[in-house]
Amino acid sequence: MIFAGVPFLVFYQFFAATLRSRGNSRIPLAALTISSICNIVLDLLFICVFNMGIAGAALGTILSEALVMIVCGYNVYGMLHEKKADDDIARDNNEYISSDVVRRLIVVGLPMALQSGITAIGGLIVISNVNHFDITFLTGYTIAGKIYALLEIAASSYAVAVVAYVSQNFGARKIDRIHSGVRASLIIGIGTALVCSFIMIAFGQSAMGLFVDSSSVSPDVFKYGRDYLLVLGIFYPLLYTLYIIRAALQGGGNSFVPMISSFGQLIMRVFCAVVITGFIGCRGIYYGEITAWIFANLILIAAYYYELHLKK
């Protein structure tokens, strides 16, 4: 049932990206906030009042996804039909579907879609190998992964901003602004990553207590989770660098290299999960993430500097 909401998510992403390309990130944020509140209310209504169970939760999610799509779509419609004296939004009134535009969208969009798929496949393979270890490691790894995912949100948000910024300036041929913007983004991103690293290293084990009661599980659960967060925390700036450089390349229309870097990440994560764990045990899972970040950064940074000099 939940798959019925996929079309709403697709169009939401399209509308939200269109708004962000015009420098409007407030509407997507407001729409998501309203949708989240609506989802909570509808879940309570369908589950507690109408006793619909899991189907009610799914229906609430679908309706919330439809709402966020409608809000963003309405604002895109208003933006495209807004009359401005300086013709702020250029439109071709004679040709609504251009074969050249469609081709460029496919060339840029298809590698990005494949990149997401590759990342998901890598995650599935790693999880399948994690399941071979005992339940204490699996629990600690899973809980630490939730903390890692929470601290990763800022990186993905910076990436969205960098894509919009770079694409706008790339279209305007203001290459110098792109480079200065990427440098500023790296400074902000690495600074944020260092804060996240401190949180993971200093408070990671305490944060795990928010997800599980220490008295109800083995102390090894917290030990494994702490070790995982320690390794990630030391190298966390690499992840933020990866997000920003990858976004800069995508904003400049190069989605092929980011896709190749995702293949590199997949190879390193799988190699460490399948092979290295045979020599050093569960720590191979930890180092799989780090080696994947390093490998991807080498590819992305080399490509970025190549394009930097190419477009000067």
Image (cartoon, grey):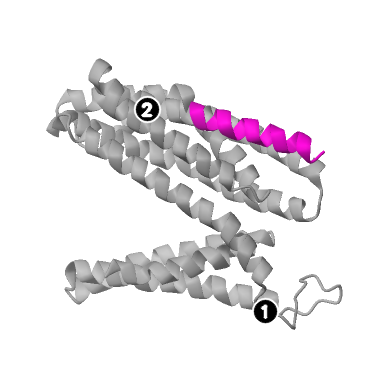
* Residue at mark 2: 288
Other residues around mark 2 within 10 Å, as few (<14) / some (14–19) / many (≥20)? many
Q: Which mark is residue 96?
A: 1
Query: What residue range appears in magenta?
Result: 294-312
The secondary element bearing badge 1 is classed as loop
User: Furthest residue to the top?
Assistant: 279
Indicate which label's residue lies in the foreground, 2 or 1. 1
Disc 2 element: helix
Q: CA distance from mark 2 to mark 1?
A: 47 Å
Q: Residues within 10 Å of mark 1 (few under 14, many from 20)?
A: few
* Residue 156 location (% of width, % of height): 52, 45
- Name the amino acid, label 2: Gly
Q: Which quarter of the rendered picture does the C terminus lie within?
A: top right
Q: Residue at x 41, y 45 (%)?
A: 118
Residue shown at the point (66%, 60%) measured from the top left: 21
Q: Is residue 128 above or below residue 25?
A: above
